[in-house]
Amino acid sequence: MELFKIEVDRVNVTTNYNNRFVAIVYDREGRCYTHHDASFADYAIAKEFCDKIADRGYLNGDLWDCSIPYGSLAWIQDGMEERIIQDEKDGLL
C-alpha cells in the first residue's frame, strides 16, 4: 500500500484546547494539517517531533486532519468559496 504523501512547506509548534503542545504542518498551498493523536506536555518533545517532520519533508496524509485557511491559495484551488455559498443555499450553515 502506497502512502498518501503530503509535501511539507513549514512546521510549527502550537498549543491545543487542552494546553498541550501539538505540531501544525502546512503544505505549499497553505493547507493546515494536525495530527489528532500527537500532543505533548513538554515543548521540547513537540519541537523534536516537528523537526523530524521537517527533516523528512513529507507526512502521511492518512494520519493527519486537514483544514483550509481562508485566503490561502488552497482555499481558491479547492473551491472553498463555492462550497460555502452552496452550503449557505442548502441551509447547512
Image (cartoon, rainbow, N blue to C red):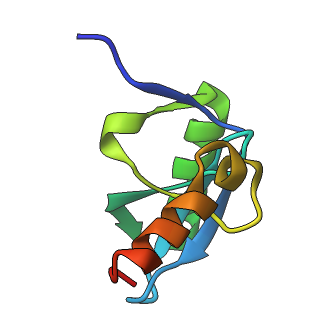
**32 left or right, relative to 77:** left
Of all residues shown, which one is farthest toward the bottom?
A: 18
Of all residues shown, which one is farthest toward the top?
A: 1
| Quarter of the view holding residue 55 | top right
Residue 3 shows up from this direction: yes
Of all residues shown, which one is farthest toward the front?
A: 89
In front of the other: 42 or 21:
21
In front of the other: 70 or 41:
70
Percent of width and height locating residue 13: 62, 66
| Quarter of the view holding residue 60 | top left
Q: Is residue 72 above or below residue 89?
A: above
In front of the other: 25 or 43:
25
Residue 41 shows up from this direction: no
**78 left or right, relative to 64:** right
Identify which residue is drawn at 65% across, 36% down: 8
User: From the image, which quarter does the C terminus lie in?
Assistant: bottom left
Identify which residue is drawn at 43% across, 76% down: 89
Q: Is residue 53 above or below residue 18?
A: above
Identify which residue is drawn at 34% across, 83% down: 91
Percent of width and height locating residue 85: 54, 71
Identify which residue is drawn at 35% across, 19% down: 3
**87 left or right, relative to 12:** left
